[in-house]
Amino acid sequence: LLLMSAIATPADFPPPDKLPSAAEFPDVLTARDGTKVTTRKEWEEKRRPELKALFEHYMYGRFPEKPKQVTAKVLFEDAKALDGKGTLREVELTFGPPEWPKIYLLVATPNDKTPAACFVGPNFGGNHLLTPHEKVRVPTAWVPANYPGVEKGTNKATAAGRGKQADTWPLRQVVEKGYAVATFYCGDVQPDRPNVREGMRATLPPAEGGAPGDETATVMWWAWGCHRAVDFLVTDKAIDPKRLAVVGHSRLGKTALLAGAFDDRIAVVIPHQSGCGGAGPSRSKNPKAEPVKRITTVFPHWFCGHFSAFGDDTTKLPFDQHGLIAICAPRPVLLTNAEDDQWANPPGQFDMLAAAAPVYKLYGDDRPVAAKVPEQGKLSDERLGYFIRAGKHAMTPDDWKVYVQFADKWLR
Ligand code: GCU
């Protein structure tokens, strides 16, 4: 029985109103039983698993098991795509049970540099938005109405959207820098809407008694999709399995951070403008930033049922988002932001890096984060990196230059 005390069990998760309050960010190195973690061994064996279990239970829902089988089929391959600089492929990933959704991974690899380091992550509206290439599949799953080429009233993507958001994942630009890129439509894994049992959510038994509690939520499913993409990438000859960076924007930035935290095969983690529920603190002091109450009301499906209970009182949360960053240690994490996007809480995100630093120090990095927020447009390329540019909420070719700059340092 004594042996069990180090492992979190469901009985360790009291309802939110029974949890102690803490106005400050809970110390990453203090375990729930009050003991102070001082070694890497204690961190890895006790506190890190404890934090992961807490994030699963109270925020993102259960971490889904790896499927027994992941099968990849190349749907097309074009070595002349990207003006001859790179090869474009689309790879269909299937997972055994025929009713499970498939993932279509768009993979761009440099022709002159293999195996290449690779950026991997989900996209918002379909691979076909990212390139005019005619062979790229148009999604058949539900897509949000406001994306280019989506048929009015039906939420169906059409070929009219081809290439219309090529700037968000600038394949050629990144391939020219010697990196591969792999991306998939997030909605193939889990469509971005509440109250519908579709996508991977439909593979779970129906929730009993109404309240989904710690049922795997949408952001966790999207992270699961990243992990399945990684399953393929680590087997691909054109990719270096040790040099994978996960990237995502906004709700998919929240996803990138969670995906990095829960999969050690990912070497670098880049949540872009991820905000509340990502790298932004739940205990926010920024009046312009999105609060937990708002996010759990407007986007209830992103998080598990338990998280909504913290909307009125985030001091009850047994962690804050620096815990998720700390789980990534000692792997580099870069938080990228924009000045006009206070909704994503850029200053609060910097606080999260600073609060995660003690764990990175355990791994021997004495100065893992800059002493203060770097000036606008200047990358702070510490292991816990930070960047803020002028402008608004968007993922742009200039942002990709910064991801590449950071990768040039940490994935060489
Ligand atoms: C909304 C939401 C944010 C989210 C963003 C996005 O603004 O409130 O939390 O990050 O959408 O995904 O673009």
Image (cartoon, helix red, strand yellow):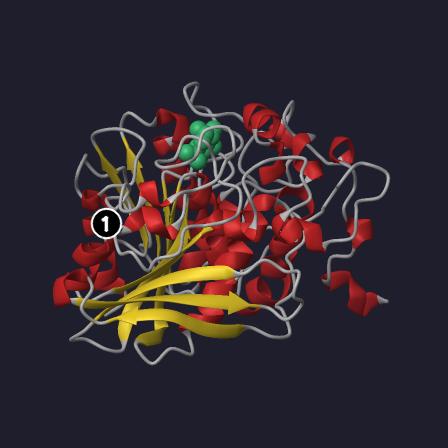
Q: Residue at x 57, y 26 (%)?
A: 298
Q: Is residue 186 visible?
A: yes
- Vertical side of 360 occupied by 289: above or below: above
Left/right placement of residue 30 relative to residue 238 reads: right
Closer-to-camera residue (34/178):
178
Left/right placement of residue 117 relative to residue 284 reads: left
Q: Quadrant of the N terminus?
A: bottom right
Image quarter for ligand 1 equals top left
Q: Residue at x 57, y 31 (%)?
A: 299
Residue 390 figure quarter: top left
Q: Residue furthest top?
A: 287
- Vertical side of 263 occupied by 202: above or below: above
- Vertical side of 194 occupied by 170: above or below: below
Q: Quadrant of the C terminus?
A: bottom left
Question: How dense is the environment of label 1, judged by Cα within 10 Å: few (below 14), some, or many (20 and up)?
Answer: some
Question: Where residue 399 sits: x, y (%)?
Answer: 23, 44
Question: Where residue 355 sits: x, y (%)?
Answer: 44, 44
Question: Where residue 57 sits: x, y (%)?
Answer: 69, 47
Residue labelled with disc 1:
400
Q: Residue at x 32, y 41 (%)?
A: 160
Closer-to-camera residue (241/361):
241
Label 1 near ligand 1 (CB < 8 Å): no
Count numbered badges in the picture: 1
> Could you tell me which secondary element the residue under label 1 belongs to?
helix
Closer-to-camera residue (190/300):
190
Q: What amino acid is labelled 1 in the image?
A: Trp
Q: Is residue 324 visible?
A: no
Question: Where residue 223 sits: x, y (%)?
Answer: 52, 54
Left/right placement of residue 240 relative to residue 304 reads: left
Residue 184 figure quarter: bottom left
Q: Residue at x 61, y 50 (%)?
A: 199
